[in-house]
Amino acid sequence: MKSIEAGERRVANIHDASFTPFVYPDGVAMGDSILQLDEDRPLGEGFHVYRMPAGMRTRSHRHNGHEQFLILEGELHESDGTILRAGDLVFYRDGSEHNSWTPTGCVLAVHIPSAETPLE
């Protein structure tokens, strides 16, 4: 097996790494932020860690591809009334629509194959 060369691996710890503020394509920033190691993908696409501050509500959106996420910390309330907590693994089918709100703040490990379509 060949050894891993410099630049072939990136490592960040979610507890002390710098997250990048997420700015929507229309220039709106809502306080959420992302830790993403794959610099070849647009911010928020592919695999990343997503942090929402307490009291934040996401924009309503439609998924373009299946979304999957694992709640690592906190609590997330979905637009249909479902409450998700740390340890919950969630799958949203391509084309599904929703928004989310967190009363306490939360951290999610997320995989989104492509940008979401805003509904607002």
Image (cartoon, grey):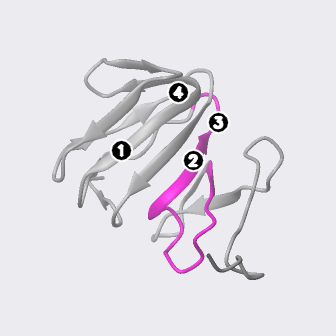
Displayed quadrant of residue 6: bottom right
Magenta stretch in the rendered image:
32-55
Q: Local crowd at mark 2 within 10 Å, few (<14), some, or many (≥20)?
A: many
Question: Residue 76: percent from the left, percent from the top?
Answer: 47, 26
- Circles 3 and 4: CB atoms closer than 8 Å: yes
Question: As shown in the figure, which amino acid type bears the numbered disc 3?
Answer: Pro
Q: Could you give the CA–CA distance between mark 2 and mark 4, rounded to whole angstroms?
A: 13 Å
**Of label 4 and label 1, which has the lower sequence position?**
1
Question: As shown in the figure, which amino acid type bears the numbered disc 4?
Answer: Thr
Q: Which mark is residue 53?
A: 3
Between residue 50 and residue 26, name the one nearer to us.
50
Question: As shown in the figure, which amino acid type bears the numbered disc 1?
Answer: Gln
Residue, disc 4: 102
The residue depicted at 60 percent of the width and 76 percent of the height is: 39
Q: Residue furthest right?
A: 16
Q: Local crowd at mark 3 within 10 Å, few (<14), some, or many (≥20)?
A: some
The quarter of the image holding the N terminus is bottom right
The residue depicted at 61 percent of the width and 62 percent of the height is: 36
Residue, disc 2: 50
The residue depicted at 42 percent of the width and 40 percent of the height is: 69
Q: Could you give the CA–CA distance between mark 1 and mark 3, rounded to whole angstroms?
A: 20 Å
